[in-house]
Image: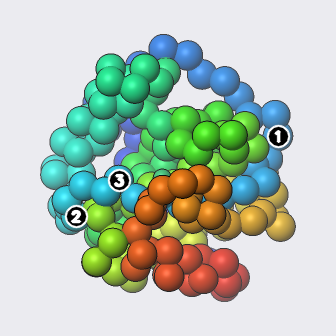
Amino acid sequence: MDQKVTIVSRLEWSAASPRNREALGGPAQRVIIHHTALANYTNQRQCMDHLLSIQRLHMKDRGFDDIGYNFLVGADGTVYEGRGWGVVGAHTKGYNHDSLGIAFMGNFNNDAPSKEAISSVKQLLQSGVFQGFLQSEFDLFGHRDLGNTECPGKKLYIALSQLRTTG
Ligand SMILES: [Zn+2]
């Protein structure tokens, strides 16, 4: 790995404190990819506003303890800390307790994910395995593989094979 992934912390994007946090029982067995299904933002300022509105939506309207995803990624390849490593998310009904949920910020029904976002998520996954938060033989799914949803969008779903290859 010649490049380290940049993770913008919760503190940096001014996240509200979670109501509750539940630790995963061990390294995650699955990675589940989502999209936020909203506009495709590129710069960090827009992404941070977007994060705050997603967190509000998840906590106020849906009654989640926190933003649902473990991590989110912007089109410029910046990764944002959601619930973070080792925490049970709220993103895929029935699969949250052994999974890591990662959301690409944008709507990928028509737009393809950027090379930068794909590359950052690959690095994030490698780093998760290295740190022991993710099993080395993890399975990677799109949300639609496990639930009745279009998520993560047709174009991102097609691109998931790029995340399954190592190196
Ligand atoms: Zn989803």
**Residue at mark 2 to residue at mark 3: CA–CA distance:** 9 Å
- Picture coordinates of residue 166, whole percent (x, y): 69, 82
Q: Is residue 3 visible?
A: no
Callout 2 secondary element:
loop
Q: Do callouts 2 and 1 mark residues in contact (Cβ within 8 Å)?
A: no
Q: Amino acid at mark 2?
A: Asn
Please name the residue that numbered disc 3 is placed on.
36
Q: Nearer the viewer, mark 3 or mark 1?
A: 3
* Residue visible at 47% across and 69% down in the picture: 120
- Figure quadrant of residue 63: top left
Frontmost residue, 165 versus 128: 165
Q: Nearer the viewer, mark 2 or mark 1?
A: 2
In the image, residue 41 sits, relative to residue 90, either above or below, namely below
Callout 1 secondary element:
loop
- Figure quadrant of residue 56: top left
**Total numbered circles:** 3
* Residue visible at 19% across and 42% down in the picture: 49
Frontmost residue, 152 versus 31: 152
**Residue at mark 3 to residue at mark 1: CA–CA distance:** 27 Å
Please name the residue that numbered disc 1 is placed on.
26
Q: Earlier in the sequence, mark 3 or mark 1?
A: 1
Please name the residue that numbered disc 2 is placed on.
40
